[in-house]
Image (cartoon, helix red, strand yellow):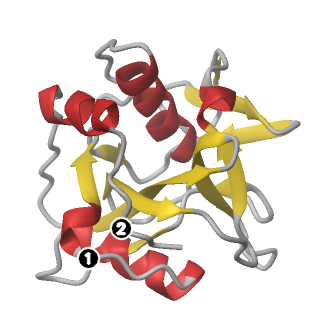
Amino acid sequence: MGDQMVPPPEIRSALRRFRRRRVRRWGAQRAALAVPIVSTCDGLAVLLTRRVDGLTVRAGQLALPGQWARRWESAPAAARGQLADEFGIHLPPEAVLGLLDDYPVDPGDDFRTRAPQVITPVVVWAGEYSTTAGVIVVPLADLDAEPVFVSSAHAERPEIRLPLQGEWLHAPAAAVLHQFRELVLHQRRIRVAIA
């Protein structure tokens, strides 16, 4: 994996035309979510992982690979670092295709955070796919599903969920992949999180 085959121009083009929303919050923890796009024998796909069972919130659920960004680390560098750590996919900086809207998480949202967080989604081209343990391959066509918005006692706004592979993908990954779907598959610009 990580073959430097040229990424599909329609993905890069859609992301270059998109003017993403940045969220700046004093004292917020910063994190990056990687949206790894790969080429498979059946077409383009995105790679997901499964949250570890030991977590207190949303253990065992599908997720995008992500990690906290260090103090001076950029979101693209943090996303590429997580792909290297979690999947063994080592990508150069030019593998980054673009960024989606920042996703703010406030204390008290369904994540039960103590401090505000800002998550930056980073779309990366990971080349041709070969089997890697712990990776769930989702064809891009499977992202073309209508989301459901669910109210929660822990969150101020409804949470987006996407039906995917017989289960639900939750926010923030659901919001990120829904925005990716709208931008890339349908050339529609939408905002999925309120700053």
Task: Indicate the secondary structure of the residue bearing disc 2.
Answer: loop
- Which label sits on residue 4? 2
Q: Around disc 1, counting alpha carbons within 10 Å, would you say few (fewer than 14), some (14 to 19), or many (20 or more)?
A: few
| Quadrant location, the N terminus | bottom right
Q: As drawn, is 94 to the left or to the right of 10?
A: left
Q: Do the residues labelled 1 and 2 touch (CB within 8 Å)?
A: yes
Q: For the residue marked with disc 1, what is the amino acid?
A: Pro
The residue drawn where x is 88% and y is 36% is 166
Tell me residue 194's x, y (percent).
31, 28
Q: In this view, does 5 lie above or below 140?
A: below
Q: Which residue, given by chain and number where applicable, does mark 1 sit on?
A: 92
Q: Around disc 2, counting alpha carbons within 10 Å, would you say few (fewer than 14), some (14 to 19), or many (20 or more)?
A: some
Q: Which of marks 1 and 2 is nearer the N terminus?
A: 2
The residue drawn where x is 34% and y is 44% is 103
The residue drawn where x is 42% and y is 13% is 186
Q: Nearer the viewer, residue 157 or 165?
A: 165
The residue drawn where x is 64% and y is 15% is 146
Tell me residue 26's x, y (percent).
11, 60
Tell me residue 100's x, y (percent).
28, 41
C-alpha gap between disc 1 and disc 2: 9 Å
Tell me residue 83's x, y (percent).
47, 75
| Quadrant location, the C terminus | top left
